[in-house]
Image (cartoon, rainbow, N blue to C red):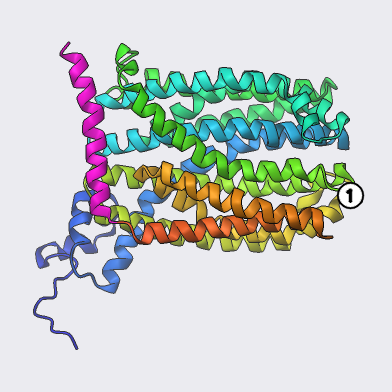
């Protein structure tokens, strides 16, 4: 048995009473104190208490973040559900636009916004609040520029879809729907940087209240537009755009008026244009990192319309399953956001041990949740199909894909969380290469071979994506396990000091 002479308890004898008090442990223990504790030898009971402490912070952040992420995605899901009752063709057209074309914008906007999480999260951890508002303004400038470019893609998506081999009637319906989504682009360009700006400061509950209120309004508006007024896919898309604008305006008014942002937001400034190029580079890396991942699933949906079998059934079945998979992904992206905030805050505050501990706790939590979700999907496989359609042929096609959906959901318990670690640490450029190799050099080619050259069809394409996700997950696990968190702290401090130094230089001019 090891000697107990050098054993250090979780806390000193003087603090034993304080540690045994749950209220003190859960509410008053500082990150600095936990970082110190993690450097000692810890008992089993001590580990359990530290896990409880970290879990409380994690769920404070991720609970509201999950609500925001899930409801933001469900805006589109609700619109698709209402559109599906207009017929199979309107559903196919709306799906190809909403999941394929709109997915492109979501990937770019969310990816670019992850740079806000990296910079603002680490800056907040370092208590350099004055730099956060400038970083946020840089993000707004770049996001609005991206929205202007994407507007052309939305307007001309019909010919693009036809050139990619989509049936003419599906491409035409998709173009009509995409035209109604153009106003949404600019709402996304404003809302996502604002969400990340607030989340980096641990301001999450107000966002959850906002998105829930707008979601309830969105359901009502869709019911009125589709059932009461009897409008079609274009008006349904406009309804989706309107709801996003309401949410974006609420985000903006909160930042402008809330006392919680008085230190981080001090008004618009010309300093936002200083040093925008370095920020632009990490923004591009962030966008590429996430887009390569998101576009793979979108590419699979587009390619499913080219399969020899009935293109409408193939497209509708995989679109329905993808909606559930993306819904699960949106849930995990809430955990991803919380992870990136926790990691970036602790790296900025020079707490390497706590950053590593946060990664371990959130991965264990998300894996358990994914196991439960996978089981529920298998149990309710038929009921999930009926929420979108009454067509018996389509219901059967969806049921055949449900086991693959369950596998994908299980993998979602690890992969998005590790992406959150990458965002919080500023590894976006490295993970972009990982995603390129895993999805486009391995996963998608395998999916195409299985889908077009075997009898598996849509299921074969999905198996290819599963292989890509599995490979990406394994690589990210290796990168995370091998991480030197002390060096990550040094990088974070250098990044924060560089950004703050540029602002100080401008102030002295």
**Which x, y percent locates residue 165?**
81, 36
At x 18%, y 20%, the residue is: 504
**Residue matched to label 1:** 309
In front here: 476 or 201? 476
Residue 380 seen in the current view: no
**Which x, y percent locates residue 191?**
50, 26
The image quarter containing residue 79 is top right
**Residues shaded magenta:** 484-509
At x 58%, y 47%, the residue is: 329
Q: In the rendered image, which quarter contains the N terminus?
A: bottom left
Q: In the rendered image, which quarter contains the C terminus?
A: top left
Main secondary structure found in the magenta portion? helix
In front here: 222 or 106? 106
Q: In the rendered image of this protein, does residue 82 appear above or below residue 231?
A: below
Magenta stretch containing residue 498, yes or no?
A: yes
At x 52%, y 63%, the residue is: 368
At x 78%, y 33%, the residue is: 82
The image quarter containing residue 224 is top right
Q: In the rendered image of this protein, does residue 460 appear above or below residue 162?
A: below
């Amino acid at each position: 048995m090891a000697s107990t002479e050098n054993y250090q308890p979780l806390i000193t004898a003087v603090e034993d009473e304080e540690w045994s008090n749950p209220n003190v442990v859960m509410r008053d223990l500082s990150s600095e104190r936990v970082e110190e504790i993690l450097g000692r030898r810890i008992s089993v009971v001590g580990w359990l208490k530290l896990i409880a402490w970290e879990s409380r912070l994690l769920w404070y952040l991720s609970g509201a973040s999950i609500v925001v992420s899930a409801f933001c995605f469900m805006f589109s899901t609700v619109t698709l559900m209402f559109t599906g009752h207009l017929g199979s063709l309107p559903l196919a057209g709306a799906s190809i636009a909403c999941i394929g074309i709109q997915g492109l914008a979501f990937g770019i906007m969310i990816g670019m916004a992850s740079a806000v999480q990296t910079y603002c999260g680490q800056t907040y951890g370092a208590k350099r609040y004055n730099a956060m508002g400038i970083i946020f303004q840089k993000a707004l400038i770049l996001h609005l520029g991206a929205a202007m470019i994407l507007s052309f893609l939305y307007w001309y998506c019909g010919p693009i879809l036809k050139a990619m081999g989509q049936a003419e009637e599906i491409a035409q319906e998709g173009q009509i729907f995409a035209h109604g989504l153009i106003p949404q682009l600019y709402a996304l360009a404003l809302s996502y940087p604002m969400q990340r700006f607030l989340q980096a400061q641990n301001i999450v509950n107000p966002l959850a209240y906002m998105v829930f209120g707008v979601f309830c309004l969105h359901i009502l508006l869709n019911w009125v537009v589709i059932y009461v007024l009897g409008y079609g896919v274009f008006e349904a898309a406009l309804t989706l755009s309107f709801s996003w604008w309401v949410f974006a305006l609420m985000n903006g008014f909160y930042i402008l008026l809330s006392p919680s942002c008085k230190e981080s937001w001090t008004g618009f400034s010309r300093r936002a244009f200083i040093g925008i190029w370095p920020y632009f580079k990490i923004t591009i890396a962030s966008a590429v990192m996430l887009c390569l991942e998101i576009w793979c699933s979108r590419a699979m949906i587009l390619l499913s319309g080219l399969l020899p079998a009935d293109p409408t059934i193939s497209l509708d079945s995989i679109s329905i399953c993808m909606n559930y998979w993306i819904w699960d992904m949106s849930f995990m992206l809430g955990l991803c956001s919380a992870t990136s905030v926790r990691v970036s805050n602790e790296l900025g505050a020079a707490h390497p041990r706590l950053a590593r501990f946060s990664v371990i706790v959130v991965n264990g939590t998300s894996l358990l949740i994914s196991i439960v979700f996978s089981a529920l999907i298998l149990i309710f496989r038929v009921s999930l199909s009926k929420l979108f359609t009454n067509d018996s042929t389509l219901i059967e096609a969806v049921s055949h894909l449900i086991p693959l959906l369950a596998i994908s959901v299980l993998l979602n318990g690890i992969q998005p969380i590790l992406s959150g670690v990458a965002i919080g640490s500023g590894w976006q450029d490295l993970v972009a290469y990982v995603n390129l190799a895993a999805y486009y050099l391995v996963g998608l080619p395998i999916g195409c071979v299985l889908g077009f050259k075997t009898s598996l069809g849509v299921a074969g394409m999905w198996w290819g994506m599963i292989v890509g996700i599995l490979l990406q997950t394994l690589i990210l696990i290796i990168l995370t396990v091998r991480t030197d968190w002390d060096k990550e702290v040094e990088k974070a401090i250098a990044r924060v000091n560089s950004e703050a130094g540029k602002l100080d230089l401008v102030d002295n001019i």
